Image (cartoon, rainbow, N blue to C red):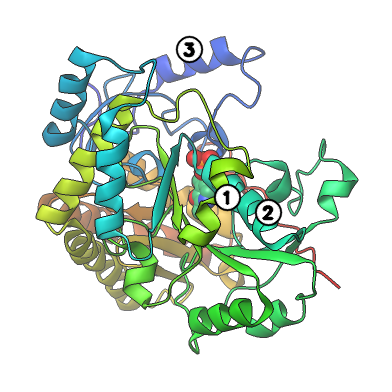
Amino acid sequence: MPNSVQLNPTYPVITKSDELYARATGLIPAYTQTLAKGPGQYIRGVAPKYLQRGKGSHVWDVDGNEFVDFNMAIGPLSLGYAYPAVDNAIRAQLEEGITFSMMHPLEVEVAELIREVVPNAEMVRYSKTGCDATSAAVRLARAYTGRSKVLCCGYHGWHDWYVAVTDRNRGIPQAVQDLSFTFNYNDIQSVVDSVDDDVACVILEPMVFEEPKDNFLQRLRDVCTRHGIVLIFDEMWTGFRLALGGAQQHFGVNADLMCYSNAVANGMPISILAGRREIMQLCEKEIFFFTTFGGEALSLAATKATILELREKRVPDALARQGRKLKDGYKDIARQLAMTYTSCGGMDCRTIVTFDASAGNPLEMKSLVQQEMIRRGVLWGGYHNMSYSHTDEDIIHTLTAYREVLPILKRAVEDKNILSYLRGEPVEPVFRRSGKRAG
Ligand SMILES: Cc1ncc(COP(=O)(O)O)c(C=O)c1O
């Protein structure tokens, strides 16, 4: 019998996952197409590796084990797996065609809808991936300002201009590396210190897990305006989730260009670049940003259906409401157990569980919690990426599991031997920014 969403007596059987993994060995380098979905992010020997299907907030792996999923495809499933309103729109479009020889009416309809719900979206373009949109934004900023340097602060995709600031920068020409620099979130001085007359843009996620402090976003806006720098909000996580109009609406600060992808099409591959007309219109003749599948109609149909559903059901409010129950619930349990070294923070719609290095190796602590949550039917990556399909029952089950699991972590920490509690290799760190400063 496969495990299900309950306090299972055993760890799940993962034979078929391991068989697939063995077939991929030596065939698919790094195994995964998305780092955060890869085997390095899960405790080996315990966690499944391949998922077969999903419905609502639940998934089934290839061995038939069922889990509540709090990763939600690493963000895209704002509504949930196999969500009828979106899937029906995709099916209806499929009857008519996927990709066409000319433009499709949905390109216009969806752009009008985005202009309606996103502040400051005077012009709109589509592409397929998040880094398509961020890279086009950077190119636009360079074209608009006639400058070269980029200041960034989070993760923005795999392209040269961004990966230049990480520790995986092999294969990127030095000339490109020399143009990208980092600053610290909530540290306006680190931006100011990096500004010179060759800075084309500042790109950042308006919020990741830390709230903006001391009016940081507005001050950043002011610095950019003062120096003629293009401000780009990478709204992959905040867009259509923190509010329908994203971080611009939520924090009341406008960027010049905004990039969206994650939550806007409930899992279909689309990204959106939007922003001020004066800059966006350089896409007409000056810069080149075109791709074969940019106007692919299934994703546009999914986008339209998703945005309408997000708006009608006030989904951003619902995500925050359900997410807050988990965040507060987790913190309460940790407090009752006097576990000061673990907490839960972030936007209510997307929270992260943190472990303080003062108590032990955070990756080992994360691995132990993951191992025990997986046994209890929760596919747990350290985050609560909320979807509209997460029910009260899911939340109650998850908090019940935490109530069993956190005492195990506490015991392991007190024994000062977390590794001995692990049934497999711990999770690996994700790759890092190198902290390359200008000046
Ligand atoms: C904030 C942010 N920007 C950009 C990207 C890149 O998007 P994609 O992986 O679709 O290219 C991601 C993906 O994780 C992201 O989280």
Badge number at residue 143:
2
Crowd rating for badge 3 (residues with CA inside 10 Å; few <14, some 14–19, many 20+)? few
**Mark 2 residue's CB less than 8 Å from ligand 1:** no
Q: Which mark, by number, is residue 19? A: 3
Cα distance in 3D space between marks 1 and 2: 8 Å
* Residue linked to disc 1: 282
What is the crowding at mark 2: few (fewer than 14 residues within 10 Å), some, or many (at least 20)?
some
First reached walking from the N terminus: tag 3 or tag 1? 3
Give the label, 3 or 1, closer to the camera: 1
Task: Give the residue type at disc 2.
Answer: Ala
Q: CA distance from mark 2 to mark 3?
A: 49 Å
| Above or below 101: residue 321 | below
Q: Quadrant of residue 361?
A: bottom right
Instruction: Give how far across and how far down residue 11 sits, in percent.
Output: 35, 33
**Between residues 332 and 175, which one lies in front from this camera angle?**
175
For residue 79, side relative to residue 44 (left or right): left
Counting residues from the start of the chain, the first of labels 1 and 2 encountered is: 2
Closest to the observer: 62 or 339?
A: 62
The residue sitting at 65% across, 64% down in the picture is: 201
Q: Nearer the viewer, residue 214 or 396?
A: 214
Q: Are marks 2 and 3 in contact (CB under 8 Å)?
A: no
Q: Which comes before the other along the chain, label 2 or label 3?
A: 3
Q: Are marks 3 and 1 in contact (CB under 8 Å)?
A: no
Residue 188 falls in which quadrant of the image?
bottom right
Q: Residue at x 89, y 46 (%)?
A: 174
Q: Are marks 1 and 2 in contact (CB under 8 Å)?
A: yes
What amino acid type should be assigned to the residue bearing mark 3?
A: Glu
Left or right: residue 329 versus residue 43 is left
Judged from the image, the secondary structure of the residue bearing numbered disc 3 is helix
